[in-house]
Image (cartoon, helix red, strand yellow):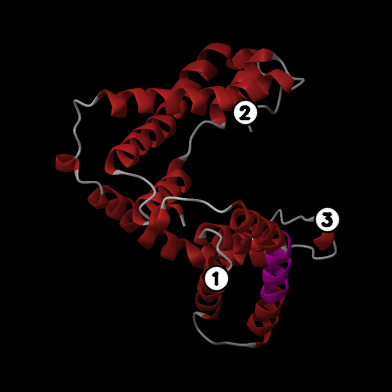
Amino acid sequence: EFSLGGGVSLLNVGKVLVFIAAFFVLAPIAAKLISLVIKRFDDVSAIPGLIPTTIVSLVLFFAWLAYAIGAPELLGGFAAGLALSRRFFLPFGIALRTNAEFADKIETQMRPIIHLFTPIFFVMVGLSLSLREIDWQSPFIWMFSLSLLAVALFGKLIGVLFIKEPWPVRWMIGVAMVPRGEVGLIFAELGRVSGVFSNEVYAAMVIVIALTTLLPPLVMKVFYSRFGQRMPEGADS
């Protein structure tokens, strides 16, 4: 709506938020029920590729369903993935227990598909950013990048102040929460495709996502090498 008309209706935003909240509560439960049906078919069927085919179809269906109600497609895929995970838990879905063996089977059979499409996604994101169209001498890009980076770091590290753990453990948890990875790139790409983000804003977001994804593991390695002996037993797991 903003990318098309330059304005936002609070009523429409409220409706979308209500739809998203309802979807986020109900979709994982529905996906879980469907996954139980898939498991039943898998137990009695010898059809090759049954699990990958049905799981991909399930994820795509919920991505489309999220798009149909005005929510990001990523939310639908995430809801389906949440329902298929080993640690599925929602207050209204407490009776839907996860079968760990079936979850492992899904993960094993889906791994080749994940390994196939993950590099393609990163290549597509890289190709979508035209470096020649961006004015790298513009102060906006660098100021905006620094501002986003500060918010990204502060937003994660401030939370460790409320954790009742030794300070080394607190900082390790805070640093571990910094990376955005492919999720941040997906939202940045959605903003670019929908016309909400300009090339400069998109470039700044990619810079911040790259920094917050690549640097924290290096920081954690150095931090753990210096303070690992002060970690409580089991913290490294």
Front residue of 175/3: it is 3
Q: Nearer the viewer, residue 100 or 128?
A: 128
Q: In the displayed structure, would residue 171 be above or below residue 103?
A: above
7 up-or-down from 155: above or below: below
Please report the bounds of the magenta region as a residue range.
25-35
How far apart in space, not on screen, are marks 3 and 1 (Cα)? Answer: 26 Å
**3D distance between C-alphas at marks 2 and 3:** 30 Å
Q: Position of residue 188 (x, y in %)?
A: 40, 46
Is 214 on the left-hand or right-hand side of 154? Answer: left
Q: Quadrant of residue 116?
A: bottom left
Give me the C-alpha separation between circle 1 and circle 2.
42 Å
Q: Is residue 88 left or right of residue 126?
A: right
Q: Secondary structure at mark 3?
A: helix
Residue drawn at (73%, 73%) of the image: 33
The amino acid at mark 2 is: Asp
Q: Earlier in the sequence, mark 3 or mark 1?
A: 1
Badge nearest the viewer, 1 or 2: 1
Q: Earlier in the sequence, mark 2 or mark 3?
A: 3
Q: Kindly state the secondary structure of the residue where label 2 is placed.
A: loop
Residue extending furthest left?
132
Q: Do the CB atoms of the residues marked 1 and 2 lie less than 8 Å apart?
A: no
In the picture of the structure, the residue carrying the numbered disc 3 is 91
SS at badge 1: helix
Residue 194 at x, y = what percent? 38, 56
Q: Is residue 198 above or below residue 59?
A: above
Which secondary structure class fits the magenta region best?
A: helix
Residue 227 percent coordinates (x, y): 58, 13
Residue at (62% x, 14% y) in the render: 229
The answer to whether 229 appears left or right of 36 in the picture is left
Give the number of the disc on residue 236.
2
Q: Please name the residue that numbered disc 1 is placed on.
A: 68
